[in-house]
Amino acid sequence: MIMSTAGPPQGARPLQGGAEAHAVRKAGGGHTSEPLHSSGLRGRLAHDAPLAKYTSWRTGGAADTLYLPADRDDLAAFVRQLPPAEPLTVLGLGSNTLLRDGGVRGAVIVMHNPGAALAVTDGLVYADAGAACPKLARFAATHDCAEAEFLAGIPGTVGGALAMNAGCYGGETWRYVARVEVLTRAGEFEVRTPADYEVGYRHVAPLEGIFTAGWFRFPRGDGAAARRRIKALLERRLATQPLSLPNAGSVFRNPPGDHAARLIEACGLKGFAIGGARVSEKHANFIVNPRGQAKAADIEALIAHVRETVRAKTGVELVPEVRIVGEP
Ligand SMILES: Cc1cc2nc3c(=O)[nH]c(=O)nc-3n(C[C@H](O)[C@H](O)[C@H](O)COP(=O)(O)OP(=O)(O)OC[C@H]3O[C@@H](n4cnc5c(N)ncnc54)[C@H](O)[C@@H]3O)c2cc1C
């Protein structure tokens, strides 16, 4: 069901990130800023902008144009002024994205916003798409909701979790979605419900438009118990995942009835490296960038090598979970 929308609920904390509106342009190797008041935009605009710091793998070339919106209306203003044929790429926290070394043509919008709004409204938890999932998990626990704890271990944005149907430890994002707000490529806001989507394991379709918000229906629960579960979940992750090194979580989906990590380990690939990229010793389905010097091409070559080796030795075709974006 597609409806028109009125944006975040009253009382939701406002976005804070884009108060200082300016453009950043590369000039003779440095950067200069210029006011953008004439264009009416309030976010941060940059050209030929390096993207590595916007991804958890810390790789990738530059975006032709990079935009960090101040809020949803500013995002809409930016999208409306893009030429219709301009390629548009959306990033949240880049925690499931391999950004290639040749960079990204067209415009890249980074949705993560540390000041993103969270609120409780009509029994639902509202979250701006730019909010980090661990914040949503803690917010839900603070408001005596249960079952949002799994989001504490997902280091992406709410928008990224909606796009990926992110999940772990039995929880999955779309199980709790009451409705979402989407900004279309034409710059119009629409509210959609789960009935508008086909949702599966790390699969959501159709994925046109930008998620700008989600309303979640979590069951009522014991907030203190939820906070204890979050703590336990994070300790478990720290013990089993290479969280101190740049990575993008699980590289491959788990094949039906099995675990990608088990297959990769069984093929003797733990610790296998190409260039600066290495299969994690701690968790075989993670590829790490230990010195922060891996090229995206190293990671992509390692992904291909792991796939080929697992296929040759076990007959299983691993399917990447990470999204590969940009020019080689
Ligand atoms: C240490 C670690 C652990 C992880 N553990 C898990 C886990 O347990 N379970 C799990 O599912 N994932 C896990 N991940 C992967 C990742 O965190 C999730 O897939 C997360 O949902 C990605 O969110 P993001 O904002 O970083 O998305 P990005 O990587 O920025 O983008 C991913 C995709 O979503 C799209 N997208 C992002 N924001 C929007 C938006 N607002 N509107 C439309 N499309 C959008 C992008 O275009 C892209 O296609 C892990 C990653 C790391 C680094």
Image (tube, rainbow, N blue to C red):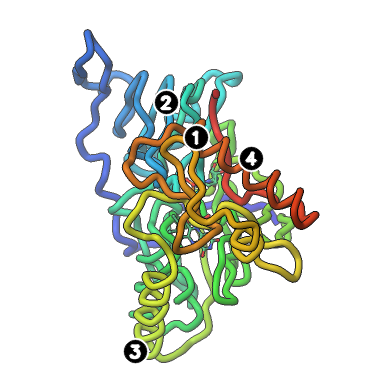
Q: Which residue is mark 3?
A: 224
Report if the CB atoms under discs 1 and 4 are less than 8 Å apart.
no
Q: Residue at x 47, y 83 (%)?
A: 146
* Earlier residue among tags 2 and 3: 2
Q: Earlier in the sequence, mark 3 or mark 4?
A: 3
* Corner quadrant of residue 229: bottom left
Residue occupied by mark 4: 304
Q: Nearer the viewer, mark 3 or mark 4?
A: 4
Q: Earlier in the sequence, mark 2 or mark 4?
A: 2
**Above or below, 223 relative to 243:** below
- Amino acid under label 4? Ala
Identify which residue is drawn at 55% across, 33% down.
Answer: 325
Query: Residue 281 versus residue 33: which sits nearer the camera?
Result: 281
Ligand 1 within 8 Å, label 4 CB: no
Labels 1 and 4: the sequence-earlier one: 1
Residue at mark 3 to residue at mark 4: CA–CA distance: 44 Å
- The residue beneath circle 2 is 61
* Three-letter code, disc 3: Ala
CA–CA distance between discs 2 and 1? Answer: 14 Å
The residue that label 1 is drawn on is: 298
Of the pair 44 and 311, the residue shown nearer to us: 311
Q: Earlier in the sequence, mark 2 or mark 1?
A: 2
Do labels 2 and 3 touch, CB within 8 Å? no
